[in-house]
Amino acid sequence: MTSHRPYLLRALYEWIADNGMTPHILVDARQPGVRVPAHAVKDGRIVLNIADRAVGRLEMDNDSVRFSARFGGVSQSVLVPVGAVLAIYARETGQGMALPEEIGGSAEPHAEAEDSAPALHAVDDGDDGEGPDDPPGGDGPSEPRRGHLRVVK
């Protein structure tokens, strides 16, 4: 059977967008084939705002998520293989899902501890003023925002 990850990703994206929230994805930037701005990667991960208003030409198929976005005022093409997407969630509420690994771990080609998912307990939303979700004029909260993802077993 084909992977269920791209179907979950598209369904959750639609659910988040239909509820007027801002979909963000957490990406393992160390995975092969990931093309994201290197300056925005922290600890091998990056959070990307994939809302329609933040990106151009968003395409999500069974293999990858592709779009163009502005980082630090410079438009760049982004390519994220579906296997590199660790989670999708709504920025405003933190509701979403840590995507399950493929059976046999094929979605994670590099070796890590099996319990790496609990690192999603507190995800920084990556809003460092360099991403596609920057508000016009730089008007943002004065304190850093913290993610609300929690792994439920």
Image (tube, rainbow, N blue to C red):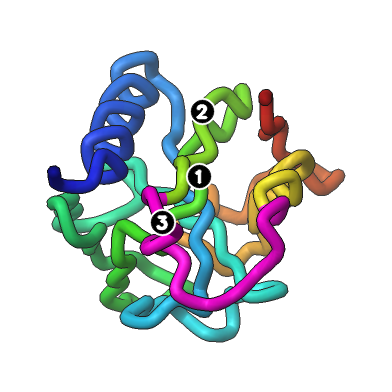
Q: Which mark is residue 29?
A: none
Question: Is residue 16 placed above or below 8 in the rendered structure?
Answer: above
* Earlier sequence position, callout 2 versus callout 1: 1
Q: Residue at x 38, y 14 (%)?
A: 19
Q: Is residue 84 magenta?
A: no
On the rendered image, what quadrant is the C terminus found in? Answer: top right
Query: CB under 8 Å between callouts 1 and 3?
Result: no
How far from the left and from the top, in percent, is residue 134?
A: 53, 54
- Please, what secondary structure does the residue beneath circle 1 have? strand
Nearer the camera: disc 1 or disc 3: 3
At label 3, counting other C-alpha atoms closer than 10 Å, the crowd grade (few under 14, some 14-19, many 20 or more) is: few
Which of the two labelled residues, at mark 1 and mark 3, occupies the earlier sequence position?
1
Q: Secondary structure at mark 3?
A: helix
Q: Is residue 143 above or below residue 108?
A: above
In the picture provided, is 137 more to the left or to the right than 132? right
Inspect the image, locate mark 2, and give the three-letter code of the amino acid beneath it. Answer: Gly
Dot 2: element: strand
- Circle 3 residue: 104
Of the pair 57 and 104, the residue shown nearer to us: 104
Q: Amino acid at mark 3?
A: Gly
> Please, is residue 79 above or below residue 143 in the view?
below
Cα gap from disc 1 to disc 3, whole angstroms: 19 Å
Q: Residue at x 78, y 42 (%)?
A: 122
Spot occupied by residue 139 in the image (x, y as percentages of width and height): 65, 46
- Find disc 1 in the rendering and name its residue: 87
For residue 136, say whether it is visible: no
Residue shown at the point (29%, 17%) measured from the top left: 18
Q: Which residues are magenta?
A: 102-116
